[in-house]
Structures are given as C-alpha cells and as structure tokens.
Image (tube, rainbow, N blue to C red):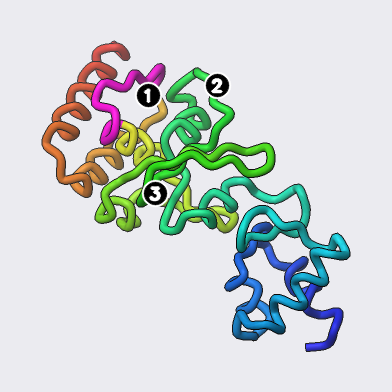
C-alpha cells in the first residue's frame, strides 16, 4: 500500500469507529509499532480523532451506537434506547442503553452509555439481534424481553407495534418461567385494550 492509501482506506470504510485491531486488519498489518506510529501521525495532524483508550473515529460525526458496541464486546443496543425508537415508551432518555457482560456507566464525549449485565447465554444468542450500520441492535421484541428480564414490573406505554409471534419465539432463550408468564399476561392485557 502507498503512503496516502492507509488513511484513504479508513475514510472509505462504512465504519465510523475503529479499534487498533480494526485499523491493523484494514491496513493488512499486525497491530505493532508501525501501525501505532502511523496512527499517531494521523491523530497529530487531525486526520483521525481519539475517542478513548484504543478507540478512534474518522471525525466527530461518528455513530455513537458503534462506539458503545466497541467499548465492551460482546454487546448490543437494547432497552430504553430501542423501546423509545419503537414508541413502546414515551419517556425521553439521552443515555444509550446497552446489553453487555458487565454493568457500568461510561461517558465519552457528549454520550453516556449505560451497560446492563445480561447472562452470557442470552447475550451471545443472535435471535432477535439485527446488524445495522456496523452495530448490533435488539429488535423491538428482543428489547421488550431484555427489559422484562431485568425489570419484572416494567411499564410499557404502548405495545401496539409489537410482533407478538416474534416475542413468543424469542422468550425461550431467557429460560425464565416468570418472564413467559409475564409476557402472556401483557399479551392478554393488550388484547383486551384493543377490544
């Protein structure tokens, strides 16, 4: 690769956030001294920006969901972030909620990421996880179930857009009788409300 091609390769990538490993793979190098030296040069000259330890972006218009997933892997966007987008809750949340293997809150730039711990057998199960723009995002049904898994008495404002068949298809991955029962109760309540 020629000297100017390294940066060009990153800038043309659909990714907006890169780890050191991503950069090394993109450049066809091991993540050694050469990669670090070249990366340092691009950071010094404002060609890339440093987000946090080991994570970089093309510019300040990076996808915050992509950053959330890169900070802790495996992880996916879920809970109130997806529920709000689906119209299932009406409350406004500025924070980005993420299902992960650990529980913590991290601020990076103007974004705050709230990681909620989910059992690894659930976290790594791909059922109900969609991959969009370099991010793993829970389907509306999976986000509802994730929320019920951690909050047994959670109140949803409007579940009229929920695909109940998909929800009942996904619920067995949680291996939780309480959740199955709760989902059935919510389904019956919503069915009654529509009459």
Q: Which residues are magenta?
A: 148-158
Residue at mark 3 to residue at mark 1: CA–CA distance: 25 Å
User: Where 82 sits versus 54, above or below?
Assistant: above
Q: Residue furthest bottom?
A: 1
* Residue drawn 53% across the image and 37% down it: 96
* Residue drawn 65% across the image and 85% down it: 28
Query: Residue 125 sits in which quadrant?
Result: bottom left
Callout 2–callout 3 Cβ contact below 8 Å: no
Callout 1 crowding tier (Cα within 10 Å): few <14, some 14–19, many ≥20: some
For the stretch drawn in magenta, what is the main secondary structure? loop
Residue at mark 1 to residue at mark 2: CA–CA distance: 17 Å
Q: Which residue corresponds to mark 2?
A: 92
Q: Which residue corresponds to mark 3?
A: 100
Callout 2 crowding tier (Cα within 10 Å): few <14, some 14–19, many ≥20: few
Q: Secondary structure at mark 3?
A: strand
Q: Residue furthest left?
A: 177
Q: Which mark is residue 159?
A: 1
Q: Secondary structure at mark 2?
A: loop
Query: Residue 99 sits in which quadrant?
Result: top left
Q: Nearer the viewer, residue 167 or 27?
A: 27
First reached walking from the N terminus: tag 3 or tag 1: 3
* Residue drawn 45% across the image and 52% down it: 130
Callout 1–callout 2 Cβ contact below 8 Å: no
Residue 179 shown in magenta: no
């Amino acid at each position: 690769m020629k000297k100017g091609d390294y940066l060009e390769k990153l800038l043309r990538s659909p990714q907006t956030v890169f780890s050191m490993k991503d950069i090394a793979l993109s450049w066809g190098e091991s993540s050694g001294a050469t990669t670090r030296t070249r990366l340092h040069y691009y950071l010094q000259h404002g060609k890339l920006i440093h987000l946090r330890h080991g994570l970089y972006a093309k510019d300040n218009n990076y996808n915050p969901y992509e950053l959330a997933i890169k900070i802790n892997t495996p992880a996916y966007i879920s809970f109130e972030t997806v529920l709000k987008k689906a119209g299932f809750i009406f409350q406004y949340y500025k924070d980005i909620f993420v299902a992960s293997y650990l529980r913590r809150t991290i601020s990076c730039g103007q974004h705050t990421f709230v990681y909620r711990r989910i059992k690894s057998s659930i976290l790594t199960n791909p059922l109900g996880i969609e991959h969009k723009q370099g991010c793993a995002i829970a389907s509306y049904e999976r986000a509802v179930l994730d929320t019920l898994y951690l909050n047994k008495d959670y109140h949803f404002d409007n579940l009229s857009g929920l695909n109940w068949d998909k929800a009942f298809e996904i619920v067995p991955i949680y291996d939780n009788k309480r959740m199955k029962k709760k989902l059935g109760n919510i389904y019956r309540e919503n069915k009654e409300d529509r009459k």
